[in-house]
Image (cartoon, grey):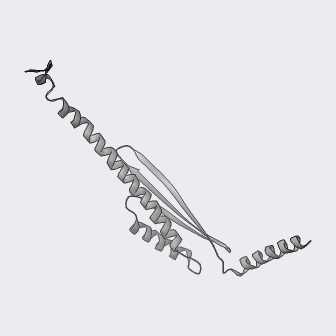
């Protein structure tokens, strides 16, 4: 059958074959983008968990287990690897190590999230700040 000089029987199955090759690729790309957006959401929720904990006055191992358990319950696709809590005199640092791997495109990523808090109620810290402020005032007066 000829229609405007094109043989229709010759091209009947082309679109089916082309879509059966292209459509799965499009679906995989969209699924990968969705998984990456879930991972970004996990990064934000982990950072929120780390900021939530005010660890002064608690033992390091005790708070480490609490943080790790809460991170495990709040993530969607990320895999928590480790939580490190460092408690100093004037500051405290919480480090969360997480990872993500997506098998089809062989995408993998490891991230380290650090949150540093300063103890404002620490007497030594307040004294140091007062000394610095007094020194600046004396320099300005001269």
Judge left or right: residue 1 versus residue 111: left
- Up the image or down, 137 lies above or below 108; here it is below
Q: Quadrant of residue 15 in the image?
A: top left
Depth check: 6 or 103 in front? Answer: 6
Residue projecting furthest to the top: 5
Judge left or right: residue 132 versus residue 119: right
Residue at x 46%, y 51% (from the top left corner):
109
Q: How many marks?
A: 0
Q: Quadrant of residue 1 in the image?
A: top left
- Up the image or down, 28 lies above or below 37; here it is above
Residue at x 43%, y 49% (from the top left corner):
108
- Up the image or down, 71 lies above or below 3; here it is below
Measured as percent of width and height from the top left, residue 107 is found at: 41, 46
Measured as percent of width and height from the top left, residue 85 is found at: 56, 69
Residue projecting furthest to the right: 142
Residue at x 80%, y 73% (from the top left corner):
132
Measured as percent of width and height from the top left, residue 129 is found at: 75, 75
Depth check: 137 or 132 in front? Answer: 137
Judge left or right: residue 78 versus residue 91: left
Judge left or right: residue 101 versus residue 10: right
- Split into 4 quadrants, where in the image is the C terminus? bottom right
Measured as percent of width and height from the top left, residue 98 is found at: 47, 59
Residue projecting furthest to the front: 4
């Amino acid at each position: 059958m000829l229609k405007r000089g094109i043989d229709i029987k010759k091209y009947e199955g082309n679109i089916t074959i082309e879509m059966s090759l292209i459509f799965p690729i499009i679906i995989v790309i969209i699924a990968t983008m969705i998984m990456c957006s879930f991972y970004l959401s996990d990064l934000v929720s982990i950072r929120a968990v780390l900021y939530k904990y005010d660890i002064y006055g608690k033992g390091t191992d005790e708070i480490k287990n609490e943080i790790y358990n809460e991170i495990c319950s709040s993530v969607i696709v990320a895999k928590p690897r480790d939580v490190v809590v460092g408690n100093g005199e004037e500051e405290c640092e919480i480090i969360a190590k997480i990872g993500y791997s997506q098998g089809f495109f062989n995408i993998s990523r490891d991230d380290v999230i650090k949150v540093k808090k300063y103890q404002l109620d620490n007497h030594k810290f307040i004294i140091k700040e007062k000394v610095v402020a007094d020194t600046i005032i004396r320099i300005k007066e001269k």
